[in-house]
Image (tube, coloured by chain):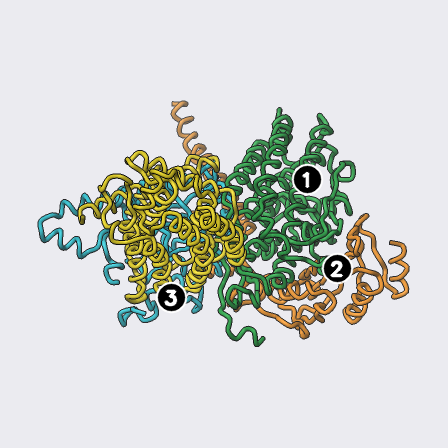
Chain colours: A orange, B yellow, C cyan, D green
Amino acid sequence: MIDLSSKLEKLSLELVEKNAHLYKVTVKLENLESILLSFLNEFGYITLDSINCRDDLEEGLFTITYCLQTEKRDHVVMVQTSIDRENATLPSMHTLWPQAEIMEREMHEMFGVDFPTHPSLIDFALEYWEHMPPMRRDFDTLEFVNSMNPFRDQRGDNLDVKVEMKKRREEKKAAKLKAEQEAAAKLAAQEQQNPDSEAQNNE
Amino acid sequence: MIFQIILLIMLAYVVGFIYFGLYRNILARIQGRYGPTIYQSFYDSIKLFSKKNTVNYGWMFYLGPIIMATGAVLTLILVPVFSDSDFLRSATSQGNLFVLLYLMVLGPLGNALAVGTGGNPFGVMGVVRGLTRLIGLELPFYIAVVGLIIAANSSDIVHIIDMQKTGGLNIINHPLLFIAAMISMVGFFGESPFDIPGAPQEVYSGPRTEFSGKFLALLMSQGSLFAFAKLVLIIDLFLGGADSLWMLVLKTLAIFVTIIFIGVVYGRYKVEQAVDFLMKIPTLIALLGLARVIWFG
Amino acid sequence: MESGFHGSDLDSSLKCKLEESGMANTHAIMEKAVNWFRSRSIFVVAYGTGCGAIEMPPTFTSRYDAERMGVVGVATPRQADLIILSGYLAYKTLRRVIRTYEQMQRPKYVITLGSCPINGGMYWDSYNTIKKLDDYIPVDVYVTGCMPRPESVIEGFVLLQERIKNGEKAGWQKYDENLKFYKDNQKRVLGGHIDPSYETDWYNLENGGVA
Amino acid sequence: MSDLKNTIKIFHGPQHPGITGNMSVELDLLGETIKRAQTHVGYLHRGFEKLVERRTVVQAFTIVCRICVPEPDPNEENFARAVENLTGLEISEKAKYIRTMILEMQRLATQFLWMGGQAGSIGLGLIPQWSVCDRDYMLDLFEELTGGRVYHMYAFPGGVRRDIPDGFLDKLSDLMNYYEKRITVYNNTFFDNTIFKSRAIGVGVVNADEALKNGYVGQTLRACGIKRDVRRDMPYLKYDQLEFDIPTRTEGDVYARALVRRDEMLQSIRILRQIIKQMPKDGEILQKIPKHRKFKLPADDTYVQTESARGAMSYYMAGDGSEKIRRMQVRGPSLVHAYTLLEKLLVDSQLADVAMTMNSLGICPPEIER
């Protein structure tokens, strides 16, 4: 691993050790293609295990992770890069690794990332999908489900838990308040009655 | 004679279905389970007859199962059921082995006509597979039958049965011919390894894919009639026929169970493999048997 | 074809003939007998729409052996009486399921496995599964559980057999009667992308609906 | 493309007896020869990764096992290990042994189910009847151990959910003896079956160089002579202390893959016997973890791999400092097999080989599309 680390240092990249079998390199988007090429041809990372995409909505980025393995398959190197969320575009890697074709097809469908050089950006899992790519974090699946599908009665699952809990707490609070008020009113009434009884007793 | 024919068809219908029920039971026991009742095939066929049909591909489609059923019924009435009584011998004197061999091809051809109009690609594929397999199946069977005809010097089944009474059973005299005919029979019964036309993992139900309800019931009845006819034919040719009902049941059952046992332990060949196998091994066996008949009597 | 849609259990022509000859009673007895035979022989096409597909092999093989009750698997929907939908349905699957269901010949029944077809189940907030199957096709028996054990699947079969035996109104009759309801729901959830039916032109129902 | 002129197009699936789950393969046939194949998935898409984003770790734990239906346990193990990697939870020795045990049990159960599928695909109806029943005995043990027959929800982050019951290991040991006997029966009826040999040898041959480069995993890789197994290469749980071989073959065809699977079953039995011997008597099974609503994942990401019964299954997981999971992506073992490999293997093969090839590649649609 020191070997790879020193090689990467020449490219002014830092290899972070996550655990004994997992390493991570963060690269810039413009260097991505050349670095992946050198990973494949020079460092011997001949297998692409997967391409993962993460939606960092707050920063307006997609974080793309290429997980690479050598011939020995005894460790994984994550090559990570970030792309802009709006007009997300990535170079297609299917010429380096054929299996990238299908992974990129999925990413195109689920996140709306565009691959200009990709040979077949057809449907992967969805069919006639007209809405926002569903894995984006701003796609509200709960709202979508409620607009598409009526639920059977007596099922409260389609409600937001947080809102419902808040509502329930407020209801509880209100009930408690009401009970207190009632108790106070009762007490007051008793106090009102009591003088009479005391008066009766006195008599 | 008409009465006897009707009686024969009814007998074949009942025996055929009970055999099929038995087949499912034996299969179940081999597989380690209970299996359905022995009358399950009756239930199935009555239920299928009571189903409604909403598919219609024209009159040719209706004709297919009927041609198949005709082939089965004709085969049945041309095969002598009992060896020494005239009872249930119906029309045996009208035909001989050559007619029977022709009738055995009639069914698949009728099926091909019907399935062609259905237009289901899986059905067409199944029919093509069936016809391809038929070439392989018929060759050893025909050679075996020709061998028997030469040995008996007659193409009349009754004569072949009578020959066996005096000269010993054909299964002992001509074992090679028997083996070849039995291998073909496994295929004629649609058992593994020759159950290629209706392979569910490949072409759904093959030729039967588009048939439903009444057509399927007709096909099932036809199948059981034909199965009975084929069993009787085999015991007539090789086991000297049957002189009583018990003998008939015993002998046909023996043949049937043998076929089941062969079928249950094998997988399915591909079409070319099946034809290749049938053209080589059973045909060779049958040819050897034929040579033995010709040169050694 | 008309009789296929609004027919009772036996062909209506036969019923008329029997009634004319004062044998309506015979008809009732025959219907009862046919129902009994129908309940004893159920051909199943198992559509593995979800997780339940994993409990289908045990149900039909030697340990639980559904065949002893006359429940047999067949390969094509044409020959089947019963379709087992084993689990949640994605929209993409629903299109195929409707197609498969319409290819089946009447009388036909539907059994679903698992909680998902009832009310979304575990995937209630998934954007790609339907939540209430009986909005789209009629369901005869729901077998609940996640996953239902083979025993409960068999119990579902027994329940269906009893319903058939008693001649209760089945899902396919509801489907034929409330066709518009089901078709509207299907259109709503699947958009305009439903395959035309095998037997009827659903989009020209007012013109007779014959394809 | 001129070949495609006279072809007919058929769909193998989604409702088809010869398909491994709810997926379909679009085939262009010339006679019975396949000229072009295209895989279609999505019939089982639930958007698991989206569902997990909306749930806390504990809520997500109950649904991850549904990702791959025939073998839920590698999913649970991956999920638990990813969470442990992110939060730094350590699990006890006993929990490690129990998890290894349940993974191996699941591997055996899955291989029995595979055997049924593989034999069924060539029309040998006897073997599915037997092997599915044999698998059921394992499911009974699962039920005793975890409470669930198919879905176990057992390997919780930080350990396992409950202790092994009394007498469980004896029952497991008996079952291992039974399985060993059964495998010799299957040897006679299935693996040495003439027809299976004649159908499987030389069909679906995978090239070794291509296998490594294209990211094929599991038996597909091992059947062409490459000794790769996550249990050995990146050992997790107790696999570095257990003795087992990695069976390999060099032919790379369907038959070689079947034999590799059979040998792996024997190895699983061997591993399970060692575990039964070494299992610690007592020990903590579940580490004390904070209350589930306050169980937070750090803003970090990790990548874990587990050897499932059909090859390496990987999870990518990222947290963002909240109690919910930012992103979990699944890379099932058969993702590449179903597309890159199957579409290539089927060209110029026969229609009869489709079901057999699919079964032998271990294609499982729910993990491809989640």
Q: Which residue is mark 2?
A: D209
Look at the picture and state if B122 lies above or below C40: below
Left or right of B34? Residue D322 is: right
Q: Nearer the viewer, residue A165 or D74?
A: D74
Indicate the quadrant where residue D110 lies. Answer: top right
Q: Kindly identify which numbered label has been placed on residue D290.
A: 1
Q: What chain does mark 3 sit on?
A: B
Q: What chain does mark 2 sit on?
A: D
What is the three-letter code of the residue carrying label 1?
Answer: Pro
Mark 2 / mark 1, whichever is N-terminal: 2
Left or right of D346? Residue C166 is: left
Q: Pinpoint residue B96: horizontal percent, then vertical percent.
A: 30, 53
> Could you tell me which residue is drawn at 64 percent across and 60 percent down?
D341
Q: Secondary structure at mark 3?
A: helix
Indicate the quadrant where residue A12 lies. Answer: bottom right
Left or right of A184? Residue D358 is: right
What is the three-letter code of the residue carrying label 3?
Answer: Gly
